[in-house]
Amino acid sequence: MSIFEYNGSALVAMVGKNCFAIASDRRLGVQLQTIATDFQKIYKIHDKLFIGLSGLATDAQTLYQRLVFRHKLYQLREERDMKPETFSSLVSAILYEKRFGPYFCQPVIAGLGDEDKPFICTMDSIGAKELAKDFVVAGTASESLYGACESMFKPDMDAEELF
């Protein structure tokens, strides 16, 4: 069993016309044993930017704390919120600097950029980005989620269809 599968997770992000959706399961488990059913895996960075963290729960919480710290420093210095593209580069850099002892997380980033253009991407544990124009998935249930997303995705869905 991989360390990424230890706590289990399922994350998906999908884009629509000037909108996006990000979803996850809420289960925290240790292999086949359920510990909690209200574990947070999607975090709000600011009003137009969210990150979902699948993988080892302790590493996900630590990585989230580091990302909040770095975003607050950016806000103080730049006096504005980070764009999703900038934030994905920050996440990639933080993951890559720990490549020899990585965070066992697969982040999914979803947000609205300039002119409410949706942005989604996912990464592996060392920060290699996978940009997408339709949907991204991560976690132990990613194979099943790919099939569901491929069958349900249509280009330019509005917010009602997407949710």
Image (cartoon, rainbow, N blue to C red):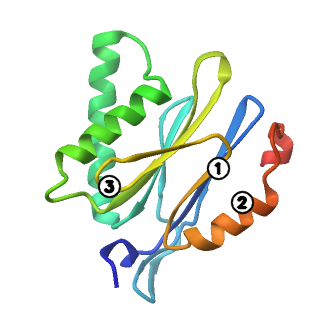
Q: Amino acid at mark 1?
A: Phe
Residue 130: x and y in percent read 48, 47
C-alpha distance separating marks 3 and 2: 27 Å
Q: Is residue 110 positioned above or below 33 on the image? A: above
Specify which label sits upstream in the sequence, 1 or 3: 3
Quick check: 95 left or right of 84? left
Mark 2 secondary-structure assignment: helix
Mark 3 secondary-structure assignment: helix
Could you tell me which quadrant the N terminus lies in? bottom left
Q: Nearer the viewer, mark 3 or mark 2?
A: 2
Query: Residue shown at 32%/56% (left/top)?
Result: 125
Mark 1 secondary-structure assignment: strand
Query: Residue shown at 34%/11% (left/top)?
Result: 78
Q: Which residue is mark 1?
A: 135
Q: Which residue is mark 3?
A: 61
C-alpha distance separating marks 1 and 3: 24 Å
Q: Amino acid at mark 2?
A: Cys
